[in-house]
Amino acid sequence: MNLEDLKNLKVPTAMIKKVFPTKKSVYTVDTTGDGNVDSVELVALNVIMPFGIPAKEDLGDIDVDEIDPSEHGKLLLDGEQIEISKGASNINLIKESLHVYHKGEKFSFKDALGGKMGGRIIAMGDEIKIVFKLDESFLAKLTEGKHTLSLESNKIPNVEIGFELTKNNMNQAFTP
């Protein structure tokens, strides 16, 4: 599959809603235990089929500090673009704080890119949690109610995740 094939791949909305259930996929969390929300937790539920993460994926020599996500797409919250260019405060926070959790085991962004998750089996019903810090101005926009997080790109399929924040998924203590 080449990059053009990937861009034309259609991601069914129904599948996204199953993988990211509206009221159970996005949380605002306190990762430090100080009582203040400092991070976002995205939870993806594997409802499709078991799959393995390749033991060694050759992505080339990637320098995380040189990646400029804005060259690959736009990230929007409720239709408002979030600054994700190289050097933006949100990007620096994400690169420094992003962790992926599977079955309680923690992997940094660099670990994931470096293949340290390789060989893991993601079973049916397994959750993958992605936790990352964002600046206060972004966190303030994550209010109670319905929201849409969108990724628009000319390189990969556009994705839209509808979610709802309620008292049950806001201001929660983070548990891996």
Image (cartoon, rainbow, N blue to C red):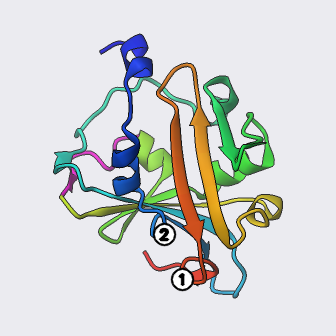
- The 10 Å Cα crowd at callout 1, few under 14, some 14 to 19, many 20 or more, is few
- Quadrant of the rendering where the N terminus is positioned: top left
Q: Which residue is drawn at the image coordinates 18% and 46% (left, top)? A: 51
- Reading the image, the residue beneath label 1 is 168
Residue 165 placement: quadrant? bottom right
Q: Which residue is drawn at the image coordinates 43% and 49% (left, top)? A: 111
Characterize the magenta stretch by its predominant secondary structure: loop
- The 10 Å Cα crowd at callout 2, few under 14, some 14 to 19, many 20 or more, is some
Residue 79 percent coordinates (x, y): 72, 43
- Please, what is the three-letter code of the amino acid marked with disc 1? Asn
- Please, what is the three-letter code of the amino acid marked with disc 2? Lys
* Residue numbers of the magenta segment: 114-123
Please give the count of numbered marks on the rendered protein.
Answer: 2
Q: Secondary structure at mark 2?
A: loop
Residue 62 percent coordinates (x, y): 51, 29
Cα–Cα span, label 2 and label 1 = 9 Å
Query: On the picture, is 173 further left or further right than 127?
Result: right
Q: Secondary structure at mark 1?
A: loop
Residue 114 placement: quadrant? top left
- Reading the image, the residue beneath label 2 is 23
Residue 164 percent coordinates (x, y): 57, 66
Q: Which residue is drawn at the image coordinates 69% and 71% (left, top)? A: 38
Residue lying farthest to the right in this orientation: 137
